[in-house]
Image: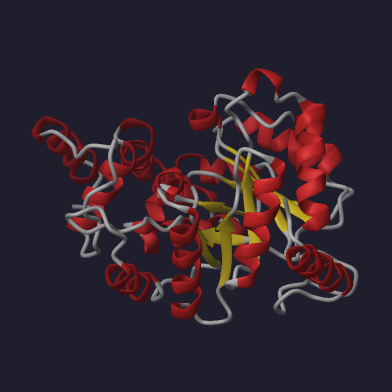
């Protein structure tokens, strides 16, 4: 159960979040936080003995900090958050906040399976420096996670969160899409500012943009593979695993889309599709971390049960980058 101190913190934080601008990112009086832009979902570095390597984490952040990202997503799917303890999740967010300039937005993944645990984790993430919480859909009992259940869950979390909430739909990992009707209802909540949609269905993204157009609600694409298409239907940015290795190129694609240079954007997008698929759907986090090693970052091992790539997989991964001119 939430103790008296936590409940007090929740109430005070919620009052602050809803009555004032948050960290300077509100776009005007009475408006929600602006989350537009590109975010790399930060990986969690581990030592050879599977301990979190905070030194390597800070080194990676300093290198990634040279690109014009809007901010960073911490403890999302690429951060291997299901494999971390609660204290490790909070310590990673705290270390990232300390390493980042204040003008970089920190979106922290605070999703847990129960509503109560998610509220507690969200409050704790706020206390260690998160600017907004990215809350993945609970999924273990996915057969019962209908619109009513998910609306209730997210409403309770947003009611009690001292920081803005970003919805997170990632069906490849959870086995369920956050239904569009639920997104539309939740977009009306004053403390829910947007959604990260990783499903790759551009018609769905466009429909969400269309149906929430009267709300102060923003949509982030969940992958660089459909970033151009998402911008074309009204998304305002992306959380892109590929930005961990091709940060300049993903930010360039953003600029080309925002300035209407669609022909150049199309050419660049085409060259990012295979590398993006390689570090997401095809080879996952082990592929992303191996690629980070090639590009001068620390990727290192994953935590078990994730395993490193085989030699054949590593060769195929490299080909997806070399054939598109990135290695």
The answer to whether residue 299 is left or right of residue 13 is left
Question: How many numbered badges does the structure rendering display?
Answer: 0
The residue nearer to you, when weighing 78 against 117, is 117
**Residue 197: horizontal and vertical position, in percent?**
61, 40
In the rendered image, is residue 211 in sight? no
Q: Residue at x 54, y 30 (%)?
A: 174
Colouring used for the render? secondary structure
**Residue 187: horizontal and vertical position, in percent?**
82, 46
Q: Residue at x 25, y 56 (%)?
A: 299
Q: Splitting the image into 4 quarters, where does residue 228 fall?
A: top right
The answer to whether residue 301 is left or right of residue 205 is left
The residue nearer to you, when weighing 55 against 9, is 9
Task: From this view, report whether residue 300 is shown above or below residue 178.
Answer: below
In the rendered image, is residue 146 in sight? yes
Residue extending farthest top: 143
Q: Residue at x 43, y 60 (%)?
A: 88
**Residue 320: horizontal and vertical position, in percent?**
23, 39
Q: Residue at x 81, y 68 (%)?
A: 8
Q: Splitting the image into 4 quarters, where does residue 103 fall?
A: bottom right
The answer to whether residue 50 is left or right of residue 84 is left
Task: From this view, report whether residue 54 is shown above or below residue 309.
Answer: below
The residue nearer to you, when weighing 218 against 15, is 15
**Residue 185: horizontal and vertical position, in percent?**
86, 38
């Amino acid at each position: 159960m939430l103790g008296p101190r936590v409940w007090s913190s929740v109430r005070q934080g919620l009052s602050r979040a809803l009555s004032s601008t948050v960290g300077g990112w509100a776009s005007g009086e009475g408006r929600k936080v602006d989350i537009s832009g590109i975010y790399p979902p930060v990986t969690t570095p581990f030592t050879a003995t599977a301990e979190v390597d905070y030194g390597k984490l800070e080194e990676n952040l300093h290198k990634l900090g040279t690109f014009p990202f809007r901010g960073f997503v911490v403890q999302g799917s690429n951060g291997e958050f299901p494999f971390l303890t609660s204290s490790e999740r909070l310590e990673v967010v705290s270390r990232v906040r300390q390493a980042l300039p204040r003008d970089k937005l920190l979106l922290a993944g605070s999703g847990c399976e129960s509503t109560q645990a998610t509220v507690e984790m969200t409050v704790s993430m706020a206390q260690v420096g998160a600017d907004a919480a990215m809350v993945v859909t609970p999924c273990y009992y996915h057969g019962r996670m209908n619109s009513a259940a998910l609306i209730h869950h997210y409403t309770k979390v947003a009611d009690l969160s001292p920081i803005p909430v970003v919805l997170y739909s990632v069906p490849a990992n959870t086995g369920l899409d956050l239904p569009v009707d639920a997104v539309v209802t939740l977009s009306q909540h004053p403390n829910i500012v947007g959604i990260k949609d990783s499903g790759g269905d551009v018609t769905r993204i466009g429909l969400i943009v269309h149906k929430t157009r009267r709300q102060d609600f923003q949509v982030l694409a969940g992958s660089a593979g459909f970033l151009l298409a998402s911008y074309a239907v009204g998304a305002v940015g992306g959380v892109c695993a590929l930005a961990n290795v091709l940060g300049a190129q993903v930010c360039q694609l953003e600029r080309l889309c925002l300035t209407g240079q669609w022909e150049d954007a199309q050419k660049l997008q085409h060259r990012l599709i295979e590398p993006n698929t390689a570090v997401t759907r095809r080879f996952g986090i082990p592929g992303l971390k191996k690629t980070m090693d090639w590009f001068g970052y620390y990727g290192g091992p994953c935590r078990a049960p994730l395993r490193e790539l085989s030699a054949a997989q590593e060769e195929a991964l490299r080909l997806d980058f070399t054939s598109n001119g990135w290695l």
